[in-house]
Image: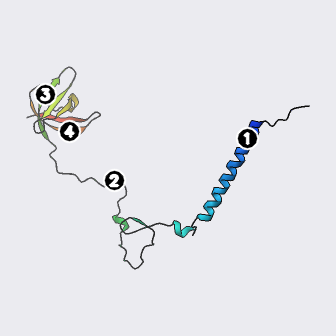
């Protein structure tokens, strides 16, 4: 005769599983009994004129602001160009003729900017006073249209 396949451990696991299922069903029944219900009306939320979330619907007697659809800007607003002086003045701090690059220090802000031989109009040497314009480069601002003063 063969032994029974149901061991003590299997019986205990089955009891725990049944107990868990019964507890879960009891909790669900308790939640159903204690819930307020009311359906969709209790779940609704509204926005007042200031953008705050409230549980009362908006008052229809309040006059609404009329907004023209053409006045709404979609995307990034246009940048207003500030009148800035494009031509700046500076002094050549370093320039290597063989490699074709150097740095110019602006006289007003004392900031250094990269200059390449392709951005030159006149030949420059270290110590020369120059006028230049700035252009965004790969690693920062670059001097272009560089002329001796």
**Which label lies toward us, 4 or 2?**
2
- How many numbered callouts? 4
Which class describes the residues within 10 Å of circle 1: few (<14), some (14-19), or many (20+)?
Answer: few
**Which label lies toward us, 1 or 4?**
1
Which quadrant of the structure image shows residue 115? top left
Q: Secondary structure at mark 1?
A: helix
Q: Dots 1 and 4: beta carbons under 8 Å?
A: no
Q: Secondary structure at mark 3?
A: strand
Q: Secondary structure at mark 2?
A: loop
* Mark 4 vs 2, N-terminal side: 2
The label on residue 93 is 3
Alpha-carbon distance for marks 1 and 2? 66 Å
Residue position for label 1: 12
**Horizontal relation, residue 120 to residue 9: left or right:** left
Residue position for label 2: 76
Position of 25 relative to 149 (above/below): below
Residue position for label 4: 134
């Amino acid at each position: 005769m063969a032994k029974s396949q149901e061991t003590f451990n299997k019986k205990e696991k089955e009891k725990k599983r049944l107990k868990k299922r019964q507890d879960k069903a009891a909790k669900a029944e308790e939640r159903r009994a204690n819930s307020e219900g009311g359906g969709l009306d209790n779940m609704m939320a509204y926005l007042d004129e200031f953008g705050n979330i409230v549980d009362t619907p908006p008052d229809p007697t309040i006059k609404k602001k009329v907004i023209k659809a053409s006045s709404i800007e979609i995307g990034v607003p246009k940048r207003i160009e500030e009148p800035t002086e494009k031509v700046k003045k500076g002094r050549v701090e370093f320039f290597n003729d063989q490699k074709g690059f150097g740095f110019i220090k602006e006289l007003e802000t004392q900031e250094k900017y990269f200059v390449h031989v392709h951005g030159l109009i006149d030949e420059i040497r270290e110590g020369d006073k120059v006028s230049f314009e700035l252009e965004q480069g790969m690693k920062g601002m670059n001097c272009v249209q560089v002329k001796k003063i």
